[in-house]
Image (cartoon, coloured by chain):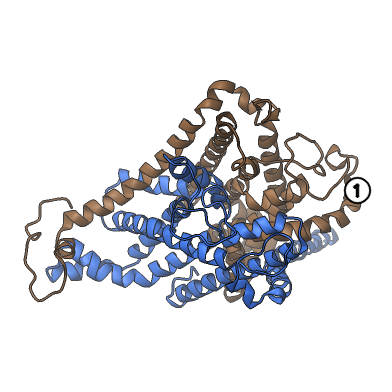
Amino acid sequence: MSSPSTTVHEARPGRRASPFARLLLTGDEITYLITLVSALSIVVITAMLFYELFINSALSRHKFGWDFLFTTTWDPVAGQFGALPFIYGTLVTSALALLIAVPIGVGAAIFLAELAPPKISDFFTFLIELLAAVPSVIYGLLGIFILVPALRIVEPALRATLGFLPLFQGPFYGVSLLAAGVILAIMIVPFIISISREILLAVPADQREAALALGATKWEATWQAVVPFARTGITGSIFLALARALGETMAVTMVIGNQPKINTSLFAPGFSIAAVIANEFTEATGDLYLSSLIELGLVLFGLTIVINGVARLLIATTSSKVAPQ
Amino acid sequence: MIAISASFARRKAVNVVMLSLTGVCTLLAVSVLFFILGYLVVHGGSSLNWDFFTKLPTPVGESGGGMANAILGSGKLILLATLFGIPIGFCGGVYLAEFGGTTFPFIVRYVTDLLNGVPSIVMGIFAYTLIVLGPRPHFSTLAGGLALGVMMIPISLRTTEEFLRSVPQALREGAMALGASKSKAIITVVIPAAVQGIVTGIMLNIARVAGETAPLLFTSFGNRFWSPGWDRPTAALPVMIYTYAVAPYEDWHRQAWSAAFVLLMLVLTINVTARLILARRGHSRR
């Protein structure tokens, strides 16, 4: 590819192409170099991203060390910064979102891949993909003005049935970990559906036919033969959705209540890593404050990188299992 | 015999119940889209007027006004992001599809996937540390455009690669058999053959960053007035929706709904157009 070419300086009369364009049209190594540099720059940009987060959080990393992740005081006035309330809020809302979204997402994926006629399946998938394209700030807007009031109506019922759990106790103001979890669930369902559907569609037909031939019902064939085959890939799609939920900013910050406290109750307001960065970054006075917020960004970056890495690995494993057949 | 038929009836019942439940899940998921659409059309569309597109925001307490500056600001940010993100992603995609060996392309693909998964708010911090914290610290259109541009690279690269790969090998061989150099074959034959797909990829990419709010909060920041040039804070439609939604004024909420309606229509129109083009081209996945 990068072998010396003799055509670089070849004249091309009769064309309006500038000398530069001519070089491009005939010079293999120039095209090669330009594209190579572009590909390389992506690696460089990602490395820079990590480097910038790392360098700019130095102040906070040196002052607090690992304690940053395990202390609960977030007091900009006293210069005390501990990230635990944000990590807690992020994990709790994401877990709640998965709890709601996984059954619905996987169920819908099964319907679209196994039951629905191709035309209907394609149309519904089209709608689901549109849903995934709705900007998160619009989810947040609907969260504030529709979901939160709706939860106020649902809340007494929740308290009556599940009130014995510490998760559903204490006063309810509307904006809460619960509201954030529900809005996240709504946002990640489309991702789970579209990826899981692809994976279910890739499961070889023998798998279904063998189960059906043994007298299984449609559901038994799906649940006992098809879904286990696709389990790794579906897990991958769930991890991808989890990474989305962890990093989701706008919708969460609009409904979570933005209070840096750890509450066991889902009815209580909380805070998430992304939300605190969105809320406090522009008003961060002082280098330590800013540095702490950037360290939170670093934590979020690390968390999503690891989870995305695992997800890609799981999905790739399933694809390679399916490919040879 | 009776026992067998009883268990068979139970299995039948489970079958019907579970299969219907999966249908219910699908309807539940899809109905969210219609709910969002319907609500925004009724709530946002009804209070939309010309002022929204032509006037500046009014001071707090004064009703009326529009978001003309935010619409222009969003346009400028998207233009910058496209100019920055698309060429890098496109050329990188050409590299992966047409050149490349084994190890390095694998690394590039993997890193691209990781970059794609980085939360948008972290992209905001990145642009902030690079540009806003520069020698003369200030928020600017440029910083916002950079943050959105970095977000566009991964998808641009992957769609370019995917569509170039779908071009039949025979086209490349034909071009080269006629005496074209490899790069000439790529530029005059392979890329034109894939151009429709690549362009729709760019459209989807633009639709995605058009709704991004988080990376703009502390890069382009916001502005209640026009923002001439590229070096000043600028308003953007998604940021306006956020600011107006969390503010305590009734009139601002009304405008937030209008802005959300406009943004959603823009994003959905681009998405539907691009996906219809792709489907007609036979790229639908089933």
Q: Is residue B179 above or below residue B116?
A: below
x and y percent of residue B11 in the render? 77, 60
Amino acid at circle 1? Thr
Considering depth in this image, is B198 or B66 the residue closer to the camera? B66
Q: Residue at image x 61%, y 54%?
A: A227
Location of residue A82 with respect to A89 vertically, above or below: above
Q: Which residue shows up at 15% across the image and 65% down it?
A: A22
State the residue in front, A88 or B17: A88
Give the quarter of the image for residue A276. Answer: top right
**A93 relative position to B174: left or right:** right
Colour blue maps to chain:
B
Direction from residue A211 to residue A263 in the image, left or right: right
Whole-percent x and y of residue A176? 78, 46
* Chain identifier, colour brown: A
The chain holding disc 1 is A
Res. A189 in view: no
